[in-house]
Every structure is written in structure tokens, then in C-alpha cells.
Image: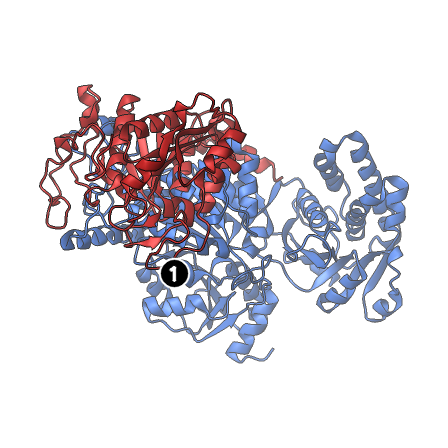
Amino acid sequence: MFDGVNGHSSDGQRRPAEERPHRPSAGGERQHNGHDHGPRHRAADGVLDLKTYASPYKPTWCPGCGDFGILSAIKAALVELEIWPHEVLIVSGIGCGSKLPQYLYANGFMTIHGRPLAVATGAKLANPKLHVLAVSGDGDSYGIGGNHFLHTCRRNPDITHIVENNQIYALTKGQYSPTSEPGFRTTTSPDGVFEMPVNPVAVALAAGAGFIARSFAGEPKHLKQMIMAAMQHPGYALVDVLQPCVAFNKVNTYNWYAERIYDVANDDTYDPTNPRDAWERGTEWGERIPIGILYRREGVPPYETNVSALQDGAPVERDLAKRLDPVLLEQLKRAYV
Amino acid sequence: MAAEGMHDDLSLSITIGGDAGQGVESSGALLTQALARGGWHVFAVPDYRSRIRGGHNFFQIRITRRPSLSHSDPVHLLLAYTRETLDVHKPNLAQGAAIIYDDGLRVDGGPLATEGFMPIPAPLTKIAEEHGAKVMINTGAVAAACGVLGFPLEPLVSLLHDTYGHKGKKVVEANEAVARAAYGWAMEHYEGRLAHELRPGRGHMAGRELMVLTGNEAFCLGAVVGGCTFVSAYPMTPATPILEWFAARERELGVVTKHAEDEIAAVCMAIGAGFVGARAMVPTSGGGFSLMTEALGMAGMCEVPVVIVNVQRGGPSTGLPTRTEQGDLLFVLHASQGELPRIVLAPGTHEQCFEAGWRAFNLAEKYQCPVIVLSDQFLAAARKSLPLDALTLDGVRIDRGALLTPSELDRLDDSYRRYAMTETGVSPRALPGHPRAVFTATTDEHGEDGHITEEIDLRVAMMDKRMRKLEGALADMRGPDLYGPADADVTLICWGSTVGPAREALPLLAGQGVTANVLHFTDIWPFPVDKAEAALAGVRRAIAVEQNYTAQFARFLRMMTGFEVDGSVRKYDGRPFSPQQIAARVLMEVGARV
């Protein structure tokens, strides 16, 4: 099981050494000299393993942060799925967890607060060959980005959405979030939260999402499996990750989650393709918190399959010189004669 | 006035007015297109309210032998679908103007005739019911107008076949029958009665092919030849037709077209698409642009090419949703926190809309930054006739700037640095997907490899690098165009769409003894200061002509050059300037006697 104190993975392994080949500067980040980039072109050696995804930069997360487990799980999932760094695009928002693309070697785009799903959708529609992941926290995904969450669920582009749900705003140093529970005291909820928390599973289900999973940052192997299943699902896939914030959330700790979570995969009677079952489990929260694949709908093609403009090739594959064909312009102009 | 038809400067204006839902704009479009098919140049502006049913709408068409640059007052023929239309438009009617209305409207023609107008009560309902169906009353009205004008019926009939062909033979034939009956009635009773006539042989170019399209449509054609492959937007008047245009041709043109959940999503989708290599565009209006400002900064910071089209409408806030204004100039120049490289273009004519369509994408990719195209409701919705050779591929090219080619990517042997320092500030650009060019971007300040930094020297170097791109872009910016005599007492300073009516005002001013010219700016940012100063050197008396309250361009011009205008003619009622309005206001400004 996981080590709730140091947040390392359940098998006790520390982050591989190649993740920190450079000594951090005083600011916690690698000194940048503009030239030192280390070995790259990793596809050239033909070996795909965790080293392939190693970044020269050391995360600035707090020791024990749940984001470490999420980063490890994403890398492990990509390796296991045999996806190379150049084949993936990880789009994030703003927040502690949204710094994640900075800490692995892969295409990444850290955008603005709340908008990674929209940016990811644009990227996916322009180049469907990319494996597109959207990664951001609960404030980013369920708060400021709530509208995009809702509409990406029903739109169903083939994007894997990993939400680092720590029930707190951490980068701004501890304000309550859309998933904070009633009574939770923070600097902006001194009397305790008296709003209902967002239940992302129920919202995603209601909004038409085709794949909804929940996992726990303290269970990197389970998390890896969930991410892999999400990436293998054709269409939008939500992985809501329970993620302890060791600095600002003293309620929802590693132990708090560990005492409550159970994997629905261990329940033979559970049918994740049944939306009623999914609703029942998805709304279960408190003494027991279900993790695993809570809902899966098969047979619905992702959004981009129905986009007519993609039938003859993606925007990034178009030969733009063909637009300079006088016959095309003449045709367009004729419609106005 | 009859003689006017013999001159090259024939200018005949028609207004069709009625309630929303009565088909005013479709009637107007039909008549406009028919006139162009008959070889006449047209310039037509719709005037409608932000509602689907009820309220007065109108459509004003100007007919000329040579291309015209705007609509024009007064009106010589009024097609009134309601009695209210008479009251609203009577003040803008020329002496002797004809007024066609359904005889069922129970208008007393006597007083109209006394006032010097020519009332034409036409049995339009009766004709429609007799020869087709009541719903075809507009077809009859348009045909009657053609008859009164002495304009041949054939162009209208051919257009009815093209327009209603998809509805089946019966509908087409009924419409044609209604048109022929109404036309016959008008010819029988009013042939030769109107001073202005559009008979064949009166000097227009019969057989010449003209297309009639809006500014929005001209922009869309330009964007197509410019290689646009991605459009995302949230519907907002008056930019919606751009989204609809691409949606209707999505498959045919291979342009991914996405109606997003809001404007923030729309611009972020376009930035995501631009980031991976699409030529992406977002049409919107001021309200939508307001929502996009944070993402605009992202495109600037992450050096992502994206084109944002702001078709301005009356503000502030919801303002005048279906009307025109040039109120967003200073806003788009400064929108988003911090300082970022951006390029702003303000086309003023349909031809310039077409050009902006392809040019914007080249500039966005060449300088890896957002490009904002400022249009407005007047330009976007105005239908203008153009010879087919007005929009060509001459000069059109697709310039993707420092985009690395596949072979260049294959040859990369050093770590790829997306934000590599260069003299021009433009870094060689890879798209995600190549094994030798894996990179990250971030909206935080970053180093050459896209990793977050707060280091002082790097921050400064990166700001310098990004902003340095504007020095290069400046060379691509055009100076103002001068129209009219080089030596003039008064210079009208214009930007964007006011150029049309301002140019049309020049002969009116000349008629009043004021020699004037027009200095028109299309390339706003980075501002071509040297070219502007050179053009302003000979200006004796400058009057800014703008569709806003604060003379934004004049203030901007002063900020950039120190040049102060001597006065301004401003309009912020949501209605476009007519040449007559500009001329009258300029005369007031210069103190000349009208």
C-alpha cells in the first residue's frame, strides 16, 4: 500500500534518478543557461521506458504532494500504452497540478486557468493523431472551467481528462474549492463552507460523458490503470483523482482517503455500463468512497469521427497551396453572381 | 433630374421598408441581386433590429453605373410594406420619389401627391393571390419596382428560378407568374413616369457579370484562399454569418468549423488548433472579444498564431446589437493584461476584407502572434457589387513564416528550443508531433525551451524577443491610402469602413467649394508611424471621420505621431454614415456655408 507520509508510490520506489539529473537552484528550479538540454531525440534509440519521459526539471511541488503520484502514473501509463513523447500533447491549466507538463518530456501546453479542455479540443480537432490529455485541478476543471467541463462531456472528443482533485486551492495558498466539503474552514471560508460541493462523477454522468473513473494519487498502480483505460476509451474520459494536498488540506489527507476508498472492480455485481448503478456509486461519498471505472458507455464514436471536414484529412495535413487554385476561387465567386 | 440617368454619375436609391418578419431583407437581397444581374452596380445596407418579429426594418439599395462605395441619400423609390414605413422614410425621400405600396394598406395617396411624391398603390395582394399565393407578395413587390424603374424582368425571373429551384417547379412557376403579373401591371400604369429609369441601353454594362456579396462574405473568401483550416466561434451578431458560412461549406472546403459553448472556448479552441498547426480563426463581436482577452494574452505569450475577427457593433455592453460602430479600436489595441505582440488590421472595403482574409493568416504565422481584424456591422452586412476580377489570386500567397519543414525537422541534431532567441524575435517553429521537436509551452514567463522561469535576465530577454517581432511586422504594415486630390484644403482622416461614405462625400464637398481628400488607414498595429507622418505632412486641415464618440483613431494618431486633427465628425447612433451626412458635418466643421 501507499506510504501516506512521504507520498511515494506503493512499491516504495522513489522517483527515478534520471528525473533529477540537475541540482535544483535556490528557487527550486533548475538553473537555465540556455544551452544545457541534455540528451533528447529519444525516439531514435528505439527504447521506450520511463527514462524516455524523464524531464531535466524537478517539480516544485511540496514533498509528499499527490501530484507526484499522478505524474508517475501518467508516465507509466504512456509507456505501457507504447506512446512516444512526440505522439502526445498534455494540455494543462493553471494551478499546482497544472505545472505537470513541465515535469515530463512530452509535448505540453500549460494554458490559462480553466481553459485546458477547450485548448485540448482545438488541438485534437486540428490534429486527431495526437494523443491529447487535459490535466488540471479541481478549481480549474470544475470551478472556473466548469462550463467547458460540462460541454466537453457531452461533446465527447477523444481526450483524457485527468483532474487533480485536492478539494483546495493550493497555489494561491489555501482557499476552498468547488469540491470542498461543507464545514471546511479556509481563508475564504472562515465560517466553514456552506455550499454544496460539486460531484464531478454525477455532473459528468448527467452531462453525457462516456467514461468516468475515479482513482487516488496514493495508489499509482490503480491510477495508472485508470489512465490507461481512459486513454483506450474512444471519446472523452474523465479520471477524477483524489489527491491529498499536504500543505493546505489537513482534512482530506492520505489516511482520510485510504480509510474510505474501495475499488468497484472488486464488486462482481457492479455493472459500470449501467447508468443507474453509476449514479448510485457516483453519488456515494463519505464513509465509503468508490474508486475505479464508475461508468463506461460503449459504442459511441468520439466527436471528431463525425466532423465532416476531418473525413478527407486533418487541418494540419491539408496542402494549403491547393487553396491558391483559381478554379476554387472562381467557384466560390460564381455563387454570388 | 431625368437627365441624371444619362450621366455617368447616375445614383438611384431604393428603400424597402416593413416589419421584421415581412421579408424586408430577403426582398432587398432579391432586388439587389437582380439589378446586378442586369449589369447595374449596387451597394445595399440592411437596417434591422435585434428581434425576430415586429418593429420597423428597412433595406436601402443604391444603384449606379460605376462601382459605388456606399449607400446614398435621398431615396428615389420607396417600397413600403407597412404604413409606418411611409412615416419613417418620408423625410429621406427625394422630390418626385415614387412610393409603391399595397393598395390594401389604405394609404391616402392625395397628400403624398400634394407633397410632390408619386404614390403608386399597387394591387400586390390581389396579384399574389390570383397568380400564386399570398406569401409571394414580396416577389410581386420587387417585380413591380422593376416595372416602375423600367428595368427588364428577365434578371429577376432567372434569379427566382435559382432562388426557389430547390422548392420545386410549382413554387418557381407560381413566383414567376406573380412577378410577371405585377411587372405587367406596373409597366401598364407607370412606364416612363419615374424620372430615373434603368432601361437597357441607358449606359449600364449589359452582360457584364457582377457578383454581389457582403463584407463578411468577402472576408470568408479571403480566408479560404489564405488557407484557413479551422473556425471556432460562438454566435454573435454581426459576426455570426462568418461561422455559418464556413459551417455550410465545412466538408467541401475542409475547414473544421466549431460552434463552441462560449467565446472563451471558441478562442481557446482556435489557439489549441493554431498551436498544433491549423490556420485558425475566431469571428466575434466586441462582447465576445471582451471574453477572449485573457486568451489573447496566451496567444501572445506562447507565440501561437491565431486570427480574431471583431465585427464591431454598437456598444457598450449589449449596446445596439444589430448596428454599427467603430468603438473597439483602442480596446483591441490594449486588450489583455501585460504587453504582448499583436497585429491589428482594419479593412475598409469589400476588396480589403478579402485581402485581410488571407493576409491575417500570413501575418499570424510569420510573426507567431495573434492578429485582430477589425470590421464592423456596416461593412460586414453591406452588399456590394463587384466585377469577378475584383477578387483574384493576384498577390495572394501562403507564407507560413519560420515553420520548420519536415526535412528541417529530420535534420535537427540539437535539442529543439521552441523559443530560441533570434535577431528577429521569431523562433523556428515546430508543430507537436515530430520526434525531434518535442516541446512544452507555458503562459508563465519561460526560457527558450518553454520551461517556466522568473530569472531576471531571461525574463527581460524573452520580453525583448517577443516585442522585437513587431519591428519586423512594421515593415509589412502599409501606410495610409490617399483618395482625391493630393492638394486639398481639407483631409478626412478615416480608418476602417468610413472610407466608403467619406470618399463619396468628396464630390459633394467639391460641389460646395471645399476641396477635400481622404486619408485612409487600414494597418493599425504595429502603427506605420513613418508612413503616416509622410502622408500627414501635406495635410492642411484634418477632420477625423469616425463611428464612435471619442474619435479614437484621432487620439491614437496623436499618441503615435503627435499629429492633432483640427476637428472630428463622429457618429455613434449605430447607423452608418451616408456621404451626405459626412459632407454636411464636414462643412459645419470647416465653417463653410452650405
For the image, the number of numbered tags is: 1
**Residue B252 seen from this side:** no
Please report, as a chain letter, where disc 1 is located.
Answer: A
Q: Residue flagged by tag 1: what amino acid is it?
A: Asp
Residue B180, how many percent across, how many down?
83, 41
Residue B46: percent from the left, percent from the top? 65, 54
Quick check: A49 above or below A181? above
Residue at 81% in and 62% down: B83
The C terminus of chain A lies in which quarter of the figure?
top right
Q: In the rendered image of this protein, does residue A16 appear above or below residue B175? A: above
Relative to the observer, which residue lies in front, A158 or B125?
A158
Color encoding of the figure: by chain
Q: Residue furthest left?
A: A23
**Quadrant of residue A106 within the rendered picture:** top left
Shade of chain A as shown in the rendered figure: red
Q: Position of residue A288 (x, y in %)?
A: 40, 36
Q: Judge from the rendering whether residue B379 lies leftward or rightward of residue A23; answer left or right.
A: right
Depth check: give the residue in front, B160 or B301. Answer: B301
* Residue visible at 58% across and 58% down in the picture: B321
Left or right: residue B487 compared with residue B323: left
Left or right: B416 as drawn, with respect to B218: left
Mark 1 neighbour class, 10 Å CA radius: few under 14, some 14 to 19, many 20 or more: few
Q: Mark 1 points at which residue?
A: A191
**Outermost residue, top side:** A46
Depth check: give the residue in front, A213 or A128. Answer: A213
Q: What element carries label 1?
A: loop
Q: Which of the 4 quarters of the picture holds residue A141? A: top left
* Between B158 and A33, the one nearer to me in the picture: A33
The quarter of the rendered structure image containing the N terminus of chain A is: top left
Q: Colour of chain B?
A: blue
Q: Is residue B142 visible?
A: yes
Residue B332 place in picture, x, y as percent:
41, 58
